[in-house]
Amino acid sequence: MNWTQIYNRALRWAHTNANDYPTTQADEDMELRHQELVDNIVVISKWDYFWDIWKTDTVIGQSEYVADKLWIAPDDLDIKKINKVFIKYKSTDQYLTRLEYKSPNTLTEHPDYYKTKQSNNAPFFYIQDESIFVYPSPTEEIVWGLEIFVAHKPAKIDTTSSEDAIEIPSQFHKLIALGMTADIYYGQGKINEAQAMEAKFDSWVSEMVSFMKQRYNQPKKKTFTDLNQFR
């Protein structure tokens, strides 16, 4: 469901209308309920559910690759973890090579030393600020020669959010509406109804957690237009 569909379902379940529950209030409640579900998924998956792959071209002699050059917008996306980094040093290579992570504090030489002295057979990377540093630096410019696997915090949802933009499995979008229904009842002073809906929300979240424990790490193709499906 997209934002509007979730909102309309909450209105139906609470037997109310847009005049009594305006979109400005709904927008705030929806994001809070969405964040509750995200937090529960994070506990299970340690951020690994919310992952994507970013690619960029390698540049001859360049070791530093800034996040926004990797199609990552640092101001818009909260990166929680970099899982893997792959690179291709020769255009004739069939596969990309995985880089080993090293802390920059463990390096015994100046970083420039590793640009040319580090073997292509033992490449490594480290992270500083909003950049990824790879060593040795490329000696060829290769299209999509650098590939980064990252786990990120899902973007906040708002009135323009499509179904794909709500980065939890689509079958659990109804939980957001259920939580919002409880919020509506609280706002109306219907405490008993609100508590009943809150209890149902908690029960459904428990079911989601149980399901996600079994399924979050199962292999499944994931693309930018398929963000709300299981891996």
Image (tube, grey):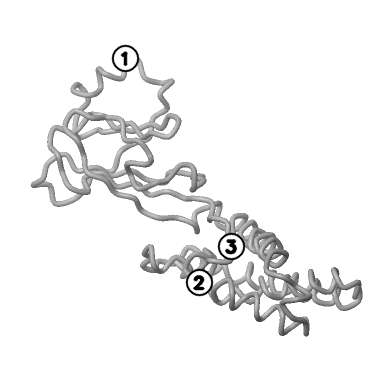
Q: Is residue 148 left or right of residue 58?
A: right
Q: Is residue 141 left or right of residue 202?
A: left
Q: Residue furthest top?
A: 109
Identify the amino acid type marked 2. Answer: Glu
Disc 1 to disc 2: CB gap under 8 Å: no
The first of marks 1 and 2 along the sequence is 1
The N terminus lies in quadrant? bottom right
Q: Which residue is found at the position 43% from the left and 20% from the top?
A: 105
Residue 122: which quarter of the image? top left
Image location of residue 200, percent across then percent down: 77, 76
Residue identified by numbered label 2? 163
Q: Could you say whether the residue bearing mark 3 is in a helix, strand or loop?
A: loop
Residue identified by numbered label 3? 158
Q: Could you say whether the residue bearing mark 2 is in a helix, strand or loop?
A: loop
Q: Mark 1, residues whose alpha carbon is within 10 Å: few (<14), some, or many (≥20)?
A: few
Q: Which residue is found at the position 31% from the left and 15% from the top?
A: 110
The first of marks 1 and 3 along the sequence is 1
Give the foreground label among 1 and 3: 3
Viewer-closest of 6 and 145: 6
Which label was assigned to residue 109?
A: 1
Identify the amino acid type marked 1. Answer: Glu
